[in-house]
Image (cartoon, rainbow, N blue to C red):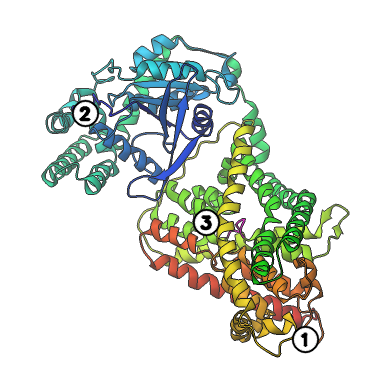
């Protein structure tokens, strides 16, 4: 099999495009969100595969690759794409068609990647997306342009307005098993460069059986970045594709060519980009492209950016926006939370009526229903947070936040690209940690990973909501701002501010050579694809219920057993019995350690179980109170905590000060084992997750201690 003329094992397509080109929207449009997620070989990076179908019965798999600006590997995402493409070149289950997604409002930048894909010898169909934004200002001779680029077809479409997908599917079908039309290199080299590059090209053509066009392209990428050579070595180490002598010869040839180019004063690092863009500019000028002058004027996005990315106004708007979101989490979620709370109580009552008195009924009501129901109550708040985060990302605002904070991030040892992973941490630390792959500096990536779990994730929200809703009064500040919302904002800001401080500290001690540059495209503001937004919110809510539900149900059952046994004589009430249960004994064992924080034995049990998942604290407290209660009904956790008193002093056991100390503990504590498993995979070492567990838990204890003891010293109870 000749690389450059790849024959696939079966008909399927790959979707490749620049970030912010609408690639994911097209994937969702073609697959109807019918997708499955797995990992690329050797790395903890998700890939999405969906089943695309057309009206005439065509059905094929569609792979959505990470967004990339070129096939020259810089970030981890780009290396994944480069390694995948190299596998295809050498006959490893290559796609029948590559769909190159192009932003019609920025042809030159987007078509750069398309021209690289056309070098591979796999039919390429261009999805000219976002035509709804420029259809009145942009005219292109698509057939002429397709012929010049060497692609099978160029299909204008709009994923947002949902038109053009039928033509795209037809073009994909027509391109299955088609032969590439151009084998010659699209651009020529001057004699000096051609002579120096010649041995490397010849090696690729003779030893790796590349076509002339592919050999030229890979030669330019090899001399541009050593990371391209690393792609060959990584692919070989994982799959044994290349022999050691071949890799050694390739490395020696590359070093010789780079040295000779440097001696001649040739800028080998930008050689491919310079040659390709010069050729692409000529192609576009020959394709009879007419661009209305309105596109050259300041557009809507640029006008809005003058305000939203302003040096002072931008951050202020961001803080106001976050405050509004957290206010909405409490005010908008009240009604659905009451519905769920009442529904859980109704289910418990039905079970009490249906089942005979006994251990099994107690297990179901006090353990399963009370434990799982206590978490489900907070689902509306979590989904509201997910909704706003998804809308802001799809709207294009999150990229502006990264742009605004780049200088600040650099000053504290982070990277402009660290903003998006950190913001993702507000939803869940795991995808945030995985998204640090876009940071090409190991030091900056590692620091981002180390501080990211300090961003308050959605698993902390049930704990915050329980404490705030129970102990913080719903007072109005300045007539408009809810004190509960302000308290929630403070918890999020506390974790964020601490993350920034620690990032600076870590940057002083973690020593690695080199720093990455930050080049980021600001996408135009776009109306979110609401179908996709609501689908993402639904999927994230479903994952929370399913994944957290499994853990919570298992722990609730175990905890019910620990809180109910052993059964002893001389314990007439459940309240006394639970003190002598296994759970009571465990709680009283740890109580001396956490007593200085204002926590009692019940919270001690909750802290232990919450190391499986933070939100389990809520279900743990609900289970304990229901087992302890003598009332033959489900106990509402908020009411139970409000009226609970210290048996020795008769004073309230939980107060606003205890609530604040507990929330601060949860801001900092390392309580998600899944997160640290991901850190182990991403850093390839247990050293860093263990370091995180130690420093975060020390920080949590000290923070809660300062809040509680400091509050008492100031006269608060």
Residue at numbered disc 1: 647
Residue at numbered disc 2: 3
Residue at numbered disc 3: 411
Query: What residue is rendered at 70% in x and 50% in y?
Result: 380
Frontmost residue, 664 versus 33? 33
Left/right of residue 502 with respect to residue 368 in the rendered view: left
Q: Is residue 35 magenta?
A: no
Q: CA distance from mark 3 to mark 1?
A: 52 Å
Is 338 above or below relative to 208? below
Residue 621 in view of the camera: yes
Of labels 3 and 1, earlier in sequence is: 3
Q: Quadrant of the N terminus?
A: top left
Query: What residue is rendered at 55% in x and 36% in y?
Result: 522
Q: Is residue 456 magenta?
A: yes
Q: CA distance from mark 2 to mark 3?
A: 46 Å
Magenta-highlighted residues: 455-459
Magenta segment, principal secondary structure? loop
């Amino acid at each position: 099999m000749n690389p450059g003329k790849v024959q696939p094992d079966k008909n399927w397509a790959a979707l490749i495009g620049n970030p912010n080109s609408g690639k994911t929207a097209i994937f969702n449009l073609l697959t109807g969100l019918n997708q499955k997620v797995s990992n690329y070989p050797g790395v903890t990076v998700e890939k999405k595969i969906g089943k695309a179908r057309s009206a005439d019965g065509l059905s094929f798999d569609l792979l959505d690759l990470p967004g990339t600006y070129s096939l020259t590997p810089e970030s981890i995402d780009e290396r994944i794409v480069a390694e995948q493409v190299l596998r295809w070149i050498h006959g490893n289950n290559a796609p029948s068609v590559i769909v190159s997604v192009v932003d019609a409002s920025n042809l030159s930048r987007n078509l750069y990647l398309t021209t690289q894909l056309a070098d591979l010898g796999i039919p390429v169909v261009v999805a000219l997306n976002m035509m709804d934004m420029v259809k009145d200002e942009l005219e292109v001779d698509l057939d002429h342009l397709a012929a010049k680029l060497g692609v099978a077809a160029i299909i204008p479409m709009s994923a947002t307005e949902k038109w053009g997908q039928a033509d795209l599917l037809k073009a994909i079908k027509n391109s299955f098993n088609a032969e590439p039309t151009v084998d010659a290199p699209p651009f020529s080299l001057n004699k000096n460069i051609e002579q120096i590059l010649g041995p490397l090209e010849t090696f690729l053509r003779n030893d790796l059986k590349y076509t002339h066009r592919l050999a030229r392209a890979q030669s330019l990428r090899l001399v541009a970045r050593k990371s391209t050579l690393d792609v060959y070595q990584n692919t070989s180490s994982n799959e044994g594709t290349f022999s050691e002598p071949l890799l050694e010869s390739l490395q020696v040839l590359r070093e010789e060519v780079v040295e000779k180019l440097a001696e001649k004063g040739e800028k080998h690092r930008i050689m491919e980009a310079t040659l390709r863009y010069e050729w692409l500019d000529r192609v576009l000028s020959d394709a009879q492209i007419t661009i209305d002058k309105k596109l050259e004027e300041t557009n809507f996005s640029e006008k809005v950016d003058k305000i939203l990315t302003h040096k002072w106004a931008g951050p202020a708007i961001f803080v106001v926006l976050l405050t509004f979101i957290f206010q909405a989490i409490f005010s908008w979620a009240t009604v659905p939370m009451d519905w769920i709370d009442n529904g859980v109580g109704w289910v418990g009552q039905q079970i009490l009526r249906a089942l005979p008195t006994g251990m099994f009924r107690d297990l179901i009501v006090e353990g399963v229903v009370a434990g799982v129901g206590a978490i489900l109550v907070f689902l509306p708040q979590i989904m509201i947070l997910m909704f706003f985060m998804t809308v802001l990302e799809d709207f294009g605002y999150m990229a502006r936040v990264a742009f605004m904070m780049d200088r600040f991030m650099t000053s504290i040892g982070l990277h402009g690209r660290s903003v998006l992973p950190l913001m993702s941490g507000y939803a869940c630390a795991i995808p945030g940690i995985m998204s640090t792959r876009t940071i090409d500096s190991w030091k900056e990536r590692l620091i981002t990973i180390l501080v990211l779990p300090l961003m308050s994730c959605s698993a902390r929200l049930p704990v915050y909501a329980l404490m705030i809703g129970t102990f913080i009064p719903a007072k109005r500040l300045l007539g408009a701002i809810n004190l509960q919302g302000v308290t929630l904002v403070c918890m999020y800001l506390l974790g964020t501010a601490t993350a920034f401080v620690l990032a600076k500290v870590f940057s002083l001690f973690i020593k690695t050579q080199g720093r990455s540059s930050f080049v980021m495209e600001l996408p135009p503001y776009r109306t979110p694809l609401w179908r996709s937004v609501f689908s993402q919110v639904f999927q994230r809510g479903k994952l929370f219920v399913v994944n957290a539900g499994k853990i919570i149900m298992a722990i609730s059952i175990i905890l019910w057993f620990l809180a109910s046994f052993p059964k002893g004589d001389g314990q007439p009430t459940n309240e006394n019995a639970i003190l002598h249960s296994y759970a009571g004994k465990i709680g009283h064992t740890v109580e001396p350690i956490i007593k200085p924080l204002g926590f009692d034995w019940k919270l001690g049990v909750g802290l232990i179980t919450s190391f499986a998942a933070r939100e389990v604290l809520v279900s743990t407290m609900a289970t304990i109170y229901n087992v302890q209660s003598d009332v033959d009904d489900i106990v509402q956790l908020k009411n139970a905590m409000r009226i609970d008193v210290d048996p020795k002093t008769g004073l309230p056991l939980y107060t606003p000060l205890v609530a604040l100390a507990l929330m601060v503990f949860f801001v900092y504590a390392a309580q998600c084992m899944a997160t640290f498993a991901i850190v182990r995979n991403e850093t390839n070492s247990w050293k860093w997750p263990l370091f995180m567990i130690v420093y975060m838990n020390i920080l949590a204890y000290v923070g809660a201690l300062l809040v509680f003891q400091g509050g008492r010293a100031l006269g608060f109870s």
